[in-house]
Image: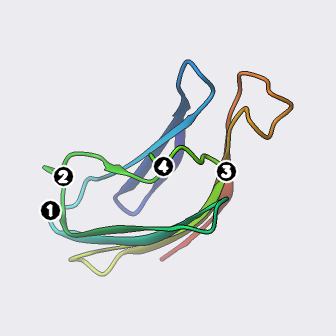
Amino acid sequence: MTVVNFNGLLINARCDSRGYPIIFAFSSANAADLFGRIFDGQGRIHIVKNSSFSSRSRGVALSTSSGDYDATGTVLYEDSQGLVVTVNYAFDNSTTLARKNVCTVYGSMIGG
């Protein structure tokens, strides 16, 4: 499912078969930067850093692989044309959603 598609930044999210969120960012720009921070439910920080983000880049993971899928994050994106996007988001999995095989990804975006 597309969560964000704005100013060259595309963020997709889905649940895997166990109800864990899988979130990736892609760029349609020739040259861009993507930086962010994810705080998981255990208080650990995960850094997102790609200063050569482009349309040729593989997707950048915006969810954690630490086994804790109850988290919040912020991602900042800019391209070489001066387009910017800031995304504040959170995600959760079945562990804290009544043990149902579901996940959620939600948040807000601002760009210009």
Q: Which circle marks residue 55 in the picture?
A: 2
**Which of the 4 image quarters holds residue 54?**
bottom left
Give, as a three-letter code, the residue at label 4: Ser
Tell me the element at label 4.
loop
Instruction: Give the CA separation, mark 1 to mark 3.
Output: 33 Å
Q: Are marks 4 and 3 in contact (CB under 8 Å)?
A: no
Tell me the element at label 1.
loop
Q: Are marks 1 and 3 in contact (CB under 8 Å)?
A: no
Tell me the element at label 2.
loop
- Where residue 25 appears, x then y in whole percent? 38, 51
Residue at x 68% of width, y 51% of height: 106
Q: Earlier in the sequence, mark 2 or mark 4?
A: 2
**Residue 75 visible, this angle:** no
**Which of the 4 image quarters holds residue 89?**
bottom right
Q: Callout 4: 10 Å neighbours few (<14), some, many (20+)?
A: few
Give, as a three-letter code, the residue at label 2: Ser
Of badges 4 and 3, nearer the viewer stands: 4
Q: Which circle marks residue 30 in the picture?
A: 1
Q: Callout 3: 10 Å neighbours few (<14), some, many (20+)?
A: many
Residue 86 falls left or right of residue 108:
left
Q: Are marks 3 and 2 in contact (CB under 8 Å)?
A: no
Q: Name the residue that disc number 3 marks.
A: 70
